[in-house]
Structures are given as structure tokens and as C-alpha cells.
Image (cartoon, helix red, strand yellow):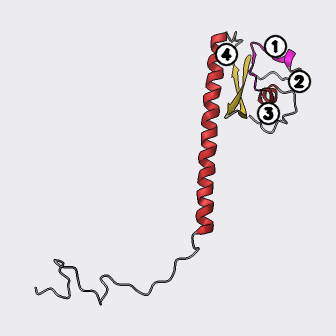
């Protein structure tokens, strides 16, 4: 994860390339990945990769990187399925960000619009001494027992 986080979008790395072009990339073997991206370093135990753009509302929000422990043919059906899954993940991320933004906005509005302290009270009592009790209610002051 550290390798991809903060990667400049101008780099030729597959994750950045997929994010900027919006076109998924599939590498069946490390040799294919190395041909497309010569600086690639072999990851221990990884033999095939899929780099999928996460696009929500027509804009890129990230890249999904899947690594497999064996070479993989990535048949057209699998590519279509992975691309669909990436679309669903992108929508979920977009909704989560929107939810967070709404929560932050509500918190900010409350913090700025509500008073910072509550007004002082004048030792209110209920019922007020000047108010007779409602009909049918008994009060301790008028009880005859």
C-alpha cells in the first residue's frame, strides 16, 4: 500500500496510468508487467495483477489493485466482472465521502450557528406557583389526605 499511496499522477506506474486514463490494465505474468513498466519490482508471492480505475460520477476517485499468487489468464468475462466490481466500489467510496462531507457540514453549522452557552435560568419550578393545577390533577399542596 505504501508503494502506491502518494504516487504522482504523472508517473508511468500502472496504478497512476489507470487512474489518469480510466482504462483498466491486466498483467497475466510478472514478465508482462515488467514489459509495460520496466521499473516494476517483483513482489514476493505475486504473479499476476489487475489495475482497475475507480470512477464515480464521471471522475476518478482511485485505483483498485488486485494481485494474484499465480499467473492468471484474465478471460474477457473475468475482466468484465472485475471492471463492474470496481464501478461498485467507486460508487460506495463516493457515497461514503458524501456522507462524511454532509456530517462535517452539519457539525460545522451547529458549531457556528448554535450558541456556545445556554442562557441562564431563574430557578424554574413546575408547576409555577402562580399557576393553578390543571383540572383533574391533584397536587401535593391541595391534597386532603
* Tally of numbered discs: 4
Identify whether 110 is placed above or below 64: below
| Local SS, label 4 | helix
Residue that label 2 marks = 39
Residue that label 1 marks = 32
Image point (70%, 22%), residue name: 67
Image quarter hosting the N terminus:
top right
Along the line of sight, the residue nearer the viewer: 74 or 23: 23
Find the distance from the CA under tag 1 to the CA under tag 4.
16 Å
Residue that label 4 marks = 79
Q: Earlier in the sequence, mark 1 or mark 3?
A: 3
Residue that label 3 marks = 3
Q: Which residues are magenta?
A: 22-36
- Frontmost of labels 1 and 3 is 1
Q: Earlier in the sequence, mark 3 or mark 2?
A: 3
The x, y position of residue 83, in whole percent, is: 66, 21
Find the distance from the CA under tag 2 to the CA under tag 1.
12 Å
Amino acid at each position: 500500500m505504501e508503494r502506491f499511496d502518494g504516487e504522482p499522477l504523472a508517473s508511468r506506474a500502472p496504478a497512476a496510468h489507470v487512474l489518469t486514463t480510466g482504462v483498466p490494465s491486466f498483467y497475466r505474468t510478472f514478465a508482462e508487467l515488467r514489459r509495460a513498466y520496466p521499473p516494476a519490482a517483483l513482489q514476493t508471492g505475486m504473479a499476476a495483477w489487475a489495475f482497475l480505475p475507480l470512477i464515480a460520477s464521471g471522475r476518478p476517485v482511485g485505483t483498485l489493485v488486485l494481485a494474484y499468487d499465480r499467473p492468471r489468464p484474465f478471460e474477457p468475462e473475468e475482466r468484465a466482472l472485475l471492471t463492474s466490481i470496481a464501478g461498485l466500489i467507486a460508487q460506495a467510496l463516493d457515497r461514503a465521502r458524501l456522507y462524511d462531507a454532509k456530517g462535517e457540514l452539519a457539525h460545522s453549522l451547529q458549531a457556528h450557528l448554535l450558541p456556545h452557552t445556554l442562557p441562564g435560568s431563574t430557578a424554574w419550578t413546575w408547576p409555577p406557583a402562580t399557576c393553578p393545577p390543571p383540572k383533574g390533577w391533584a397536587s401535593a399542596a391541595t391534597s386532603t389526605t
